[in-house]
Structure formats: structure tokens, C-alpha cells
Amino acid sequence: MKETRNTKQFETIRSIITNAGRPLSIDEMQKSALEELDSIGLRTVYRAVRRMEEMDEIQSIKVQGRADRYELSSIASSHHHHFHCTACDRLFDIHGCPGGLSDLLPKGFQMDNHDILLTGTCDTC
């Protein structure tokens, strides 16, 4: 396996994801990185994200009709849901689960997993 070095750009993206407190899109990562670095291209951000996925540091979150978001694997591994702000397009973690969802299933069905995505506007919008 090819050994890769941790560049300033890679470490900046890693730090941004680690400290974000919510799932981020590639564009959000690049915008935050530009506050710390003179320049960073989208390809560099994509490479850093791909590398962190390969290292199992982060996981992607699918948002229908929108760009994937990324959060730390340590957060993704604990059961939680998300809130998508339709005004600013940011994604937020929701901790907790309503439970009792298996009661909604048709007779004879068995649920293996579920994802809940709430939508609306966040407190800053």
C-alpha cells in the first residue's frame, strides 16, 4: 500500500470535520479551509475526504437531492437522526429516536434499520 503523508491541507480538513459539531458538505469544508489556508481546491478536499473514508475516520450521509455530508465515524456509529435546513442547506445531528416504529409496519414485516430526516429551517434561518 502506498504510504501517504499528512499535508497541511489534509490536516486542516481533518480538523474542520472533527470540530464542526455537525455533518458537513464538501463545499462547507472548502469554505472553512479557505479561512485557514491561502487556497485549497475542491479536488484536494475530495481527496482528503476519500482518504479519511478509506481510513474509516468519517462516513457519508446521503441527503436526497443534495450533496452527501460527512461526519466522524465515532458519531455515525451511535444511532441518531438528522435535521436538514432547507433554507441554508446545512445538516444537523438529532440525538434520540422516537421509538415504536415497528408498530407502523404491515403485519409480517420486520424492520432491520431506519433513518429519519427532519426538514425545515434552523434557528439561524
Image (cartoon, rainbow, N blue to C red):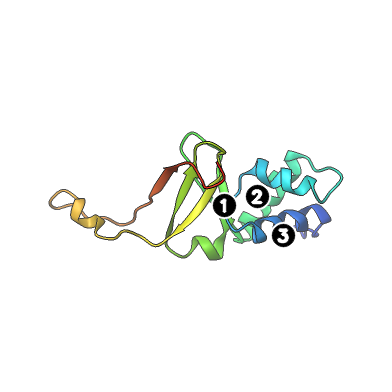
Give the foreground label among 2 and 1: 1
User: Does the residue at mark 1 contact the one at mark 3 (Cβ under 8 Å)?
Assistant: no
For the N terminus, the quadrant is bottom right
110 is higher (above) or lower (below) than 62? below
For the point 19% across and 50% down, which residue is it? Answer: 105
Q: Of all residues shown, which one is farthest toward the front?
A: 124
Label 2, on which residue? Answer: 50
Which element is circle 1 on? loop
Residue under label 3: 15
Structural distance between the alpha carbons of marks 1 and 3: 13 Å
Residue 31 vs residue 63, the one in the foreground: 31
Mark sitting earlier along the chain (3/2): 3
Circle 2 SS class: helix
Residue position for label 1? 23
User: What number is the disc on residue 66?
Assistant: none
In this image, 44 relative to 82: left or right?
A: right
Image x and y of residue 85, in percent: 50, 42
SS under mark 3: helix
Q: In front: 109, or 102?
A: 102
